[in-house]
Image (spheres, rainbow, N blue to C red):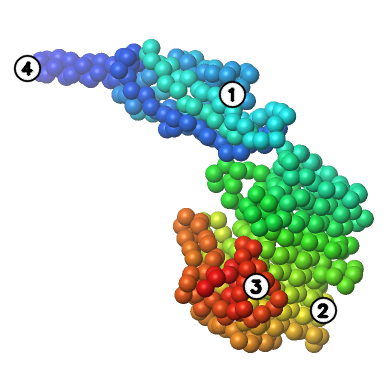
Amino acid sequence: MKARNVVFSITVLLLLSLAACKKTGFTDSPNAFVFTSADTVHFDTVFTSVGSVTQSFKIFNANDQKLRISNIVLAGGSASFFHMNVDGTAGNAFTDIEIAPNDSIYVFVAITIDPNNSTNPFIIQDSIKIEYNGKETFVQLDAYGQNAVFLNNAVVTKDTTWKNTLPVVLKGILTVSPAATLTIEKGSRIYCHAGAGIMVDGTLTAVGEKYDSTQIIFRNDRLDEYYRDLPGSWQGITFNNSSINNELAFVSLLNATNALVLKNPALNDNPKLVMEQCIVDNASGTGIFAAFSSLRAVNCLLSNCGQNIQIAAGGRYNFDHCTVASYSNSFLSHQLPVLALTDYDDNDQIFPLQALFTNCIFYGGEGFVTDEISTVQKGNSTFETTFENVLYKGNQPANATFTSSIQNEDPAFLAIDAFNNRFDFHLQEFSPCINAGMQTGTTIDLDGKERGNDPDIGCYESGL
């Protein structure tokens, strides 16, 4: 009886062992099922000579047995603009790749495009063929290429005009010398690689127009999903001590670290910088940082920065019809007042401050910040901070004068969707900002739309 039990047990073990071997063997069935996590890998605009981000997809073995992928081939081979890497190994073709049961492998893809003579965007296409058990499937690859003017740590030493024919891609720091003026034509696009920035010792003039095609844009050069909206992707523009007569109009500055930095007053009677109808958005540090300097800003939107405006060590400033607002989102947390003013520098030196804010909005989402305007005075010199016909959130700050202003009312922006990172700072029809401004001689808004006799507070005019 015991011997019979032993024989039975051995038989069961052998059967289980055979079943296990069969299960972990390779399937050669034409009905074996393989699928990929994507049927197309798409790259947004990639500048010639600049490599893209790396994307990936998975090849899944959805069978209970091992599968041998006989071939994974980049169709364009060595002539392709695309580059392939299979599970950590680079190449154009791979054979006999094993995938365990119900497991997967990664295929990584990137692209570098050679320049050509075209000024228009062009599409690059290829595919990856996957062969197994006499069957094949394909993953399509496509990318939009764009020729550009590439500048690497360039120096502008004389008066220079950048045409809008091709985008400009900056690598490293672009320097505008003290005796030089850099003029940027309307409709120009300036793309900045990681670590790139602009240092202005002379003069920068970038004047666009109200239409999308004629506005000027400074932004990062990574345009793939996620990276296109990543704050801190380039350094920003700095106006140094000797810089004078700078002008920005219908300009957007996106995704910088410190978008605009102004150091010391101009060496003439003009403001260091005049900016009209400008957007500064999604800076990881500051939208505007000014230290003992001077600035005039009209119809400007400063939104969702680490700190939208920081004014230190005094200076002279005039803001008219500006919207200054921040909300926590998937990239940045709103933790600092949207406007901060002080009369001292890092060495506690004291400087006079004169700042006038008219028809402006200072507002932020719920969370860490209670008062969206912060003023700190350490010295006994002039500290004039005047707010006329503004809407602001928080307590009235010390050492500030407010007239005809709206306190702690929601401005009723058109769309605040932090989850989807969608923000529209136009005003809804019931906004308290509508017709609540004062006449200052500003005749248009950020969109180039005419303002009436009773203008709205903020950078956008509702027309109601």
Amino acid type, mark 3 = His
**Which residue in the protein does label 2 denote?**
351
Residue named by callout 4: 1
Identify which residue, 384 or 18, lies in the foreground.
384
Q: Residues within 10 Å of mark 4 (few under 14, many from 20)?
A: few
Element at label 3: loop
Which residue does the numbered mark 1 point to in the structure image? 90
| Foreground: disc 3 or disc 2 | 3
Do residues under tags 1 and 3 come within 8 Å of each other at their CB atoms? no
Q: CA distance from mark 2 to mark 1?
A: 59 Å
Amino acid at the residue labelled 1: Ala
Q: Nearer the viewer, mark 1 or mark 4?
A: 1
Q: Residue at x 11, y 18 (%)?
A: 5
Q: Secondary structure at mark 1?
A: strand
Q: Earlier in the sequence, mark 2 or mark 1?
A: 1
The tag earlier along the polypeptide, 2 or 4, is 4
Which of the numbered marks, if any, corresponds to residue 321? 3
Residue 25 place in picture, x, y as percent: 33, 16
Marker disc for residue 362: none
- Horizontal and vertical percent for residue 112? 65, 30
* Left or right: 421 as drawn, with respect to 151: left
Query: Is residue 183 shown left or right of residue 138?
Result: right
Expressed as whole percent of the image width and height from the top left, the position of residue 391 reads 58, 78
Residue at 80% across, 85% down: 382
For badge 4, the amino acid type reads: Met
